[in-house]
Image (tube, helix red, strand yellow):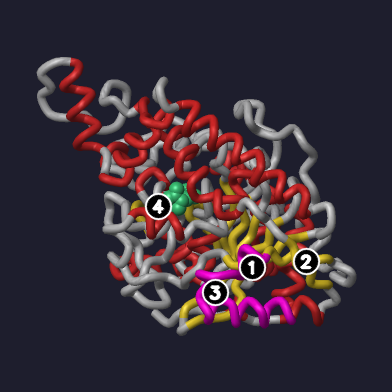
Amino acid sequence: MTATTLTALSEQLERGELSSVEATRDYLGRIEAHNAALNAIITVTAEQALADAAAADARRAAGEAGPLTGIPLLHKDIFCTNGVRTSCGSRMLDNFLPPYDATVVARLKAAGAVMLGKTNLDEFAMGSSNETSYYGPARNPWDLRRVPGGSSGGSAAAVAAGFAPAATGTDTGGSIRQPAAFCGITGLKPTYGRVSRLGMVAFASSLDQGGPMAATAEDCAMLLQVMAGFDPADSTSAEYEVDDYSGGLAADLSGLKIGLPGEYFGEGLDAGIETALRAALAEYKALGAELVEISLPRTHLAVPAYYVIAPAEASTNLSRFDGVRYGYRCDAPEDLLDLYTRTREEGFGDEVKRRILVGTYALSAGYYDAYYRKAQQIRRLIQQDFLDAFDSVDVIMGPITPHPAWVLGEKTDDPVAMYLEDIYTLGVNLAGLPGMSIPAGFADGLPVGLQLIGPHFSEARLLNIAHRFQLATDWHTRRPTL
Ligand code: GLN
């Protein structure tokens, strides 16, 4: 029987109790049996996976194995994979076969990981529910009527359902943390610049960051160790030493100062979520931490600032999809303008078009100062709120979302209602900080995530804080029955 965590699977492989081919077959079997119901995976690369697993087993037999050798993984379908369709959940890239691997993919491959396939996502990662995907929504394995969260909803649903021990995700405004919370798994959004963005199709370049999604903090540490690090081919990659993420996991938490922002526990927070989080915080107290009331006074400005900046950057990034170089092209264009307009009209879905319109407007000559510049100023103030808070606390904790996973379709007619669900996650991206979601209980039978936010480049500390909680609780071991 294949283990349920990446760490345990790695140990099984190491001890020779299981081969990578056996583990890969096992996961492919679960995908085969349950993906029709969950729609978590867009492309399954079974044949290549089995060949790579066999090669991994051979390397292990030759004594050349590392901790990730032969570990099956899924990649969010926004990471370029050489010769394997990278759709971004869009009709626009339905036929796109990248000629290279994203740095994240290449690093995990070099460490011996075996790709099982590509996971479903909101179109170009724009969304909080996975409902904007051209391939249809992924579903929450805890309740198939509900959304798995987004935009990395496919990755979260897949890990929760046992399709793979781990998956990659990307987080522009919460897309690793929020689906991790909705599906009851652990997700880490690293500091901006910690993980290379090369080959990660750009949504909002100053906010996008890739990271691991897995059952536990221990598993995320193993993956981040490989994913993190300077990439000379990404000009926003940080030339900053990579910590030993697994080495410090067990460090004691006594004296840890946890900041609780009043703004994150106020009006609008679901009572069931608050109850679960208060219990989790009591657990931290029992582990020796001190709870400190703090304030992040500009929290209410995160949604308006983000929903100007992210669409503005998206409108620029998505201008490359014009039917000329790659991706979808409309039939029989009459002239160049017709090629551009019909390709984009037919290739993009409604939410992407909405963002392009909003972003183009915010960047236009007449409105740039009023919207884009103003949003950037607010962004700086939001960052300052966090930096001030970290003068007196080591970590900030709070909810990931105001409500647990909602029913499919419930918010699709009201984009603003959907955007408001991002209130607790956007600030982290605007400030470039690392953030995590860890399973912290249930509300109405649905998983609740606890958010951990740390200073820039404090991933090792966050993983330690998460790991100690997971040693003391068993929320991260709960799995939905399929
Ligand atoms: N929900 C946010 C949005 O729709 C964040 C998405 C993301 O992090 N990719 O933009």
**Circle 4 sits in a helix, a strand or a loop, which is it?**
loop
Mark 4 / mark 2, whichever is N-terminal: 4
Q: Residues within 10 Å of mark 1 (few under 14, many from 20)?
A: many
Q: Position of residue 329 (x, y in %)?
A: 21, 29
Residues marked 1 and 3 touching at CB (< 8 Å)? no
Q: Nearer the viewer, mark 1 or mark 4?
A: 4
Task: Decide whether the magenta segment is chiefly helix, strand or loop.
Answer: helix
**Circle 1 sits in a helix, a strand or a loop, which is it?**
loop
Give the residue number, with chain letter if any, for mark 2.
258
Q: CA distance from mark 2 to mark 3?
A: 19 Å
Mark 1 / mark 4, whichever is N-terminal: 4
Q: Residues within 10 Å of mark 2 (few under 14, many from 20)?
A: many
Relative to 158, does residue 286 appear above or below in the rendering? Answer: below
**Circle 3 sits in a helix, a strand or a loop, which is it?**
strand
Is 482 in the magenta? no
Give the residue number, with chain letter if any, for mark 3.
448
Mark 1 / mark 3, whichever is N-terminal: 1
Q: Is residue 116 visible?
A: no
Type of the residue with mark 4: Gly
Give the residue number, with chain letter if any, for mark 1.
216
Quadrant in which the C terminus is drawn: bottom left
Residues marked 1 and 2 touching at CB (< 8 Å)? no
Residues in magenta, as a range: 262-282
Give the residue number, with chain letter if any, for mark 4.
127
**Circle 2 sits in a helix, a strand or a loop, which is it?**
strand
- Most foreground residue, 441 or 295: 295
Determine whether the beta carbon of the residue marked 4 sits less than 8 angstroms from the nearest atom of ligand 1.
Answer: yes
